[in-house]
Image: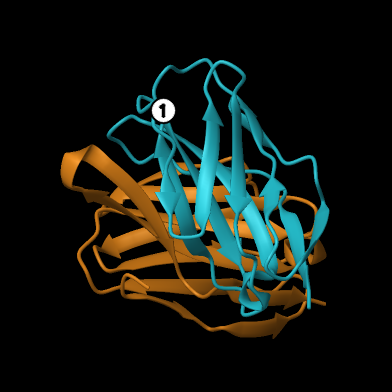
Amino acid sequence: AQTVTQSQPEMSVQEAETVTLSCTYDTSESDYYLFWYKQPPSRQMILVIRQEAYKQQNATENRFSVNFQKAAKSFSLKISDSQLGDAAMYFCAYRDSGGGADGLTFGKGTHLIIQP
Amino acid sequence: DAGITQSPRHKVTETGTPVTLRCHQTENHRYMYWYRQDPGHGLRLIHYSYGVKDTDKGEVSDGYSVSRSKTEDFLLTLESATSSQTSVYFCAISEWLAGGRNIQYFGAGTRLSVL
């Protein structure tokens, strides 16, 4: 079974600075998807960014980018120019690439605090 | 929000009572999921559905059953609620996009307290 590990229960960063959240995963598959979800206090799960394992290029979405290291099974999220609205729980998630109904496997989350 | 509505949004119930949570989607998605979220555990998959009347178990399915009689509705039932089932429950759909890309979208969640 796949596992996802987020080793940082909590991170703190000054507003406008850059922060990196760590995620490692374990799988025997060669093709899969990886995701970062944001959960603000409203509890809504919001997709931040996704990465296909077969793509070598790291995904970016505005101020959010990932560092995908397939051999190391590492998938970190970098948030540049941190804003107060970025404060939330962040979850790393994994999914097999099969065309079926596979669910997501989540890490336990990192609580991100933005210091004004 | 991919047209996902969960009801109720909050529920308090007593141990031993049956509880049904509803997930309704308006965009004809084939795949639907129920997750639970507990402190220190992230989200864990309870059950999922790959079509009408087609369901299967996830990681933490004990004590739960599901039904899907219509494409748009996926029901999660706790036959006899226990305090260990106090949690936040999320419904999700899986959408396949151009190029074989897959994304899961989540409902707003249901907070269930079993006293």
Percent coordinates x, y for residue A72 in the rendering: 62, 19
Toward the viewer: B10 or A40? A40
Residue at x 55% of width, y 36% of height: A67
Residue B38, located in which quarter of the rendered image?
Answer: bottom right
Q: Is residue B91 above or below residue B52?
A: below
Provide the letter of the chain coloured orange. B
Q: Which residue is mark 1?
A: A53
Q: Is residue B47 visible?
A: yes
Percent coordinates x, y for residue A95 in the rendering: 46, 37
Percent coordinates x, y for residue B26 in the rendering: 24, 74
The quarter in which the C terminus of chain A is drawn is: bottom right
Toward the viewer: B106 or A72? A72
Does residue B75 appear to the left or right of A18 in the view shown? left
Q: Is residue A78 above or below residue B23?
A: above
Residue at x 76% of width, y 60% of height: A111
Toward the viewer: A44 or B80? A44
- The colour with which the image depicts chain A is cyan
Residue at x 64% of width, y 73% of height: A83
Percent coordinates x, y for residue B35 in the rendering: 56, 56
Q: Amino acid at mark 1?
A: Ala
